[in-house]
Amino acid sequence: MLTEKFSKTTSLLLIATIALAMASTVSAAAGEMNEKTGLPAFLSDGLENDSLELVTFFLFFVGYISMGAAFVFFMSERSNVAPQFRTTMTISALIVGIAAFHYYYMRGVYADFGVVSIEYRYMDWIITVPLMALKFPSLVGKEAITDKKVAGLGFTGICFTGALIMIGFGYLGEAGLLSPIPALLLGGMGWAMIIVATGTPWTDGLGVDNSKISEELLWSANALRWFIVVGWIIYPLGYLFSPEVSLIDIDNGAEIMAVAYNIADIINKIGFGIVAWMGAKKATEALAAAE
């Protein structure tokens, strides 16, 4: 009983914190308006005639609002699933909650300086991508995670190392610290490591045994794999337009990159949590029916 009360109190505090942050942001944005466009004054006049820049700004805005809303949803639903799935809901909430704050700052940098920040972007990814990989064992259960190892690394080690490789080399390429093509290929190796560990919608992973995943959770596990195998393809496509990378050198490459990354984040981070929640709810109902 004490643990349950503590959990509910923590959830309410976290929800209240992000709600206050979002409210103060909206309040600040609404303080002064551009008379010609009806947009907040912090949106520079140079954006008025460029629709792609307007789309980029609004996607940053939609990004942190939708991530914040998803955070509230996942935390509120945490108490509506069986205890063994509450860690999954907490991880889902952490992913979108962390992303909401980073999107708030990325929106501010873009609105004030007209610059797409890769630093805040990679700060977000270096935290949230490993958390996304952790969602597998928390959802499917320890029994479905195999003991197979590669170079002494088990499921968690492979996923964390793969995430660090993927994000690390991506940053080196976008920051101009490494040639862009080798950075892209080496980052792709990290992505491949995560796919090998978690599996695909058609195959077991090195670290996951499908036969030990309950029927109620198998659909969600495969949906998570779809996000990793297919949904994450949007990220390297956005990378190609990065101004420092310049593999596709066109005007407004930074905005195209930002639009691709923002859409990918909204789809993958929120979608990742939604399918995990659906599986957890279905499994919770099955457990209740069996009692």
Image (cartoon, rainbow, N blue to C red):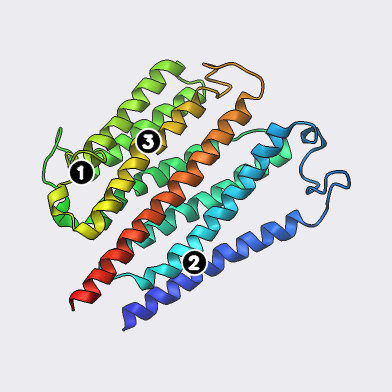
Q: Is residue 159 left or right of residue 126?
A: left
In the rendered image, which residue does mark 1 sit on? 155
Marks 2 and 3 sit apart, C-alpha to C-alpha, by 32 Å
Residue extending furthest toward the bottom: 1
SS category of the residue bearing label 2: helix
Residue 208 in picture, x, y percent from top left: 18, 46
In the rendered image, which residue does mark 2 sit on? 14
Q: Quadrant of the N terminus?
A: bottom left
Residue extending furthest toward the right: 35
Q: Is residue 226 left or right of residue 69?
A: left
Q: Residue at x 73, y 60 (%)?
A: 27
Residue 83 in picture, x, y percent from top left: 28, 70
Q: Residue at x 55, y 23 (%)?
A: 241
Amino acid bearing label 3: Val
Amino acid bearing label 1: Phe
Q: Residue at x 34, y 78 (%)?
A: 4
* Residue 243 falls in image quadrant: top right
Instruction: Tell me if I can see residue 221 in this picture.
Output: yes
SS category of the residue bearing label 3: loop
Residue 52 in picture, x, y percent from top left: 68, 32
In the rendered view, tell whether residue 109 sits above or below residue 23.
Answer: above
In the rendered view, tell whether residue 133 sits above or below residue 216.
Answer: above
Amino acid bearing label 2: Leu
Q: Of marks 1 and 2, which one's residue comes earlier in the chain?
A: 2
Nearer the observer: mark 2 or 3; the answer is 3
Task: Determine which of the numbered discs, if any, sits on residue 230 in the image.
Answer: 3
* Residue 254 falls in image quadrant: top right
* Residue 205 falls in image quadrant: top left
Label 1 with label 2: CB-CB less than 8 Å: no
